Image (tube, grey):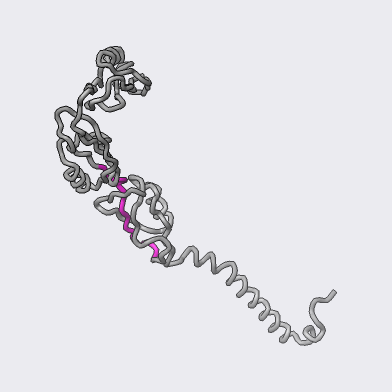
Amino acid sequence: MKFVPNFLSRRPILFAIVFWVLALSLAVVALNWVAMPIIAGRFAKTLSVPNVVGVPAEVAEITLRESGLNFKWANEGRYSGVIPANNVLIQLPTAGKTVKRNRTIFLTLSRGAQEVLIPDLRGASQRQAEISLQRLGLVLGAKKEGAHLEIPRGVVIRTEPESERKVRVGSRVNIVISSGNSSGKRLLPNLRETSLSRASHVLDSLGFKVGEIITLQAEDKLPNTVLELSPKPGEYLDIGTTINITIAE
C-alpha cells in the first residue's frame, strides 16, 4: 500500500518540501502546547501572591517559601477581634497580585482580641462609670438597682462582671446602682473560699434559703469549697431569698 501520492513520488524535491513543512508544523504545535507551558512554569519571572491572611504564622512562611517568595514580619503585631492570635493579620502585597519571583512579602501578626481590666467603679456616679468604661473601649450595659446601707442612692455598688476581671475591648459591662433602701433586708456576705457546710449554716442563720448547688472543676481548690454565690455577695436582699452556690468538685 502506498501512502505517498503518485505525483509526489515522481517529484522527490516536492515530496521533501511537503514532508518538512508538515514535520515543522507538528513540531511547532507540540512546542506550543506541551513544551512551552513546562518551560514557562519552571523559568517564569513573575507569579501570583498566595493568600496567607488568617493562616498560622508557620504555615504562612512555608506557603510563601514554596511559592518562590520571601517574607518579613513587622516588628509588632496588631490587635484583632476577627483574626486569632499568632495568625497572619495583614500581608503586603495582597493576595492575587502579580510579583517577581523572590519578592519579599511583608506580614503583620495578629495579637488576638485586645483585653482590658474592668475598673473598680464602686462609689462612682452613673455618668462617671459610663465615661470610665468608654475610655477603656467598654460599653455600658444594663443598669440594675440593689439596696445598700452605706452607699447612697444612685451611686454604683459594683459591676457585672466584677472589677479587675479581664474582658475584650467592646464588651458590655453592667452596673448595679444603689437604691439606698435596705429596710427589711439583710446583707449577703462574701462566703467564697469557705466550705459548703459553713456557707449553708451562715445563709440559714441570716434567713436566706440555699438553692441550687452547682459543681465546677477547680484543681487548686478543695472539694466543696464555695467558688461563687448568686446573687452576688455585697447586696442587701429580702429575707427568704434563694441563694445558689457554685462549689469545687
In the image, residue 28 above or below residue 197: below
> Quarter holding the N terminus?
bottom right
x and y percentages locating residue 62 in the rendered image: 40, 50
Extreme residue toward the right, this view: 1
Nearest the camera: 38 or 167?
Answer: 167
Residue 175 found in image quarter: top left
In the image, residue 59 above or below residue 225: below
Nearest the camera: 10 or 126?
Answer: 126
x and y percentages locating residue 196 in the rendered image: 31, 15
Nearest the camera: 115 or 162?
Answer: 162
Residue 70 found in image quarter: bottom left
Q: Which residue is pictured at 22% across the width and 48% down the height?
A: 134
x and y percentages locating residue 90 in the rendered image: 33, 56
Left or right? Give the position of 182 relative to 212.
Answer: left
Q: Which residue is pictured at 24% across the width and 35% down the height?
A: 176
Q: Which residue is pictured at 29% across the width and 27% down the height?
A: 231
Nearest the camera: 73 or 238?
Answer: 238
Would you say residue 92 sits in the magenta stretch?
Answer: no
How many discs mark residues in the rendered view? 0
In the image, residue 148 above or below residue 143: above
Magenta residues span: 100-115
x and y percentages locating residue 239 in the rendered image: 27, 20
Q: Which residue is pictured at 19% across the width and 48% down the height?
A: 135
Residue 203 found in image quarter: top left
> Quarter holding the C terminus?
top left
Left or right? Give the position of 159 relative to 249.
Answer: left
Would you say residue 108 sits in the magenta stretch?
Answer: yes
